[in-house]
Amino acid sequence: MAKWIKSKYPGVRYREHETRRHGVGNKLDRYYTIFYKLKGKMTEEAVGWASHGMTEKKAAAILAELHENHRRGTGPRTLKEKKALADAEWQEKEERKRQSATSNLTFATIFSTEYLPHIQANRRNKRSWKSEESLFRLWINPAVGNKTLQSIAPFDLEKIKKNMAKAGRAERSIVYALAVIRQVFNYAQTNNLYTGTNPAGPVGKVKRPSADNRRLRHLSQEEAATLLCELSKASKDVHDMALLSLHTGMRAGEIFSLTWADVDLAAGLLTLRDTKSNKNRPAFMTETVKAMLKSKPKGEPATPVFPDRNGKKIEQISKTFNRTIAQIGLNNGITDRRQRVTFHTLRHTFASWLVEKGTAIYHVQALLGHSDLKLTARYAHIGENSLRTAVQRLEAAG
C-alpha cells in the first residue's frame, strides 16, 4: 500500500494511487485526508480523491471550518456531522417540495389517480367500487372535486348532504357518500398526501344521518314456496340460487363465488371462502339443497357452481328475480325500502326461520358469519314473539 505523504498544509495528508492517473500532466491520483485532535484524541477523516475535484487547499479549508466550529461551539465539528447535517437539510428540502406538490392536489385528482385504482385492485366486489365511483361522479365531485384536501371544510360536506337530501336520496346513500369522502382522506393520510384533519372523520364536525336502514323483511313459508315455484318456471339457476340462500343463509356474493371444490356432497357441507368478514365458514346442506346440487352437472374443481353464459363467475343476480317478485306482488304497496323483498331477504328469512324454531342466537350468528352479535340481534324479536305466542297458548289451554 502507498505510504502517506504530508502536504504543505498542516493536518492534511495524502497517498498516491499506484497506477491511476488523471488531469493535466497525467499525475498519479491522490487520496486526501484531514487529521485533527477532538476531545483529546486524534481523528482522521477522508475528504476525497483528486480525480473527484479534491485538492490540498480545499482539504485545508474544510479542516479550518471544522476548527472554527469547534472554537465557537457551533456547527458540525467532524465531516461525519457535516454530512449528516447536509443530508438532513436535503431531506427537509425534499419534504418541503413534496408537501408543496401534494398540497396542490385536488380531491378529484386523488380520487381518480390514487384512491379509485387502489380499491379497484383490492376489492373483490366490483359493485362496491362502482357504487363509490358513482357517488363521487354525481355528488362529491361537483361540490369538492376542484378543491384541495386542505381547503375542504365541514361546510362543503354539509352542502353535499343538503344537495342529496333535496334530490330525495335516501339517508343511507348520504351516509355512504360521507364514508367515501372519509376513506379518501384516510387513504391520503396513510400515503403521505395529506397531513391535516379528516373533516369526515369520527372527530369531524359533520353529523352523519342516523336512520335505521336495516332490512327487516322476511318471507313466510307460503311466500317462499310461491317464490320458488315461480322462479322454477322462469330460470332453473335463479331458482337454485334462491333455494340455496333460503336454506343456508348464503349471501349472493358467496353463492357467486362457490366452486365445485367447495362442495362436499358426502358430508353435506359447503365451504364459503373469503367471505364478507374475510374468513372462511361452513354452510350445511339440507336434504333439499343436496338434491338440488346433485341434479346439476358437476364441473371442474375451480369452476363456479353457478357460472354465467361464458362459464365465468356471475357478478350480480339476474333481473329474473326482481321480475318474479313483481309478478307475484311481494312488494305491492310497500314504500319503505327496508320492507321490500330483495335477494338479500332470503338470507334474512333463513335467519328468521331458525330463530322461530328456537335456535340460539349465538348459533344463528355463526351460521350467518356475523362478526358482531349486534348484527344478529335484529332477529331476537322474532324469538320473543314465538315465546309470547307459546305463553298465550298455555293461558288459553287453562
Image (cartoon, rainbow, N blue to C red):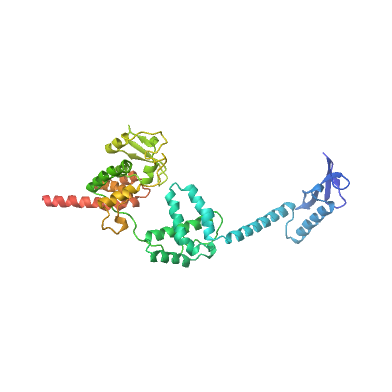
Q: Nearer the viewer, residue 237 or 10?
A: 237
Percent x, y for residue 287?
27, 36
Percent x, y for residue 167?
39, 64
Q: Is residue 55 visible?
A: yes
Residue 298 occupies quadrant = top left
Q: Nearer the viewer, residue 77 or 122?
A: 122
Residue drawn 32% across and 48% down? 321
Quarter occupied by the N terminus: top right
Residue drawn 32% across and 36% down? 293
- In the image, 85: left or right of 106? right
Q: Is residue 315 above or below residue 260?
A: below
Query: Given the current orientation, which residue lies at the most extreme left position?
Result: 398
Percent x, y for residue 86?
70, 55
Q: Is residue 358 visible?
A: no
Percent x, y for residue 280?
40, 41
Residue drawn 47% across and 66% down? 156
Q: How many marks?
A: 0
Q: Is residue 296 above or below residue 394?
A: above
Query: Given the current orientation, which residue lies at the most extreme top position?
Result: 266
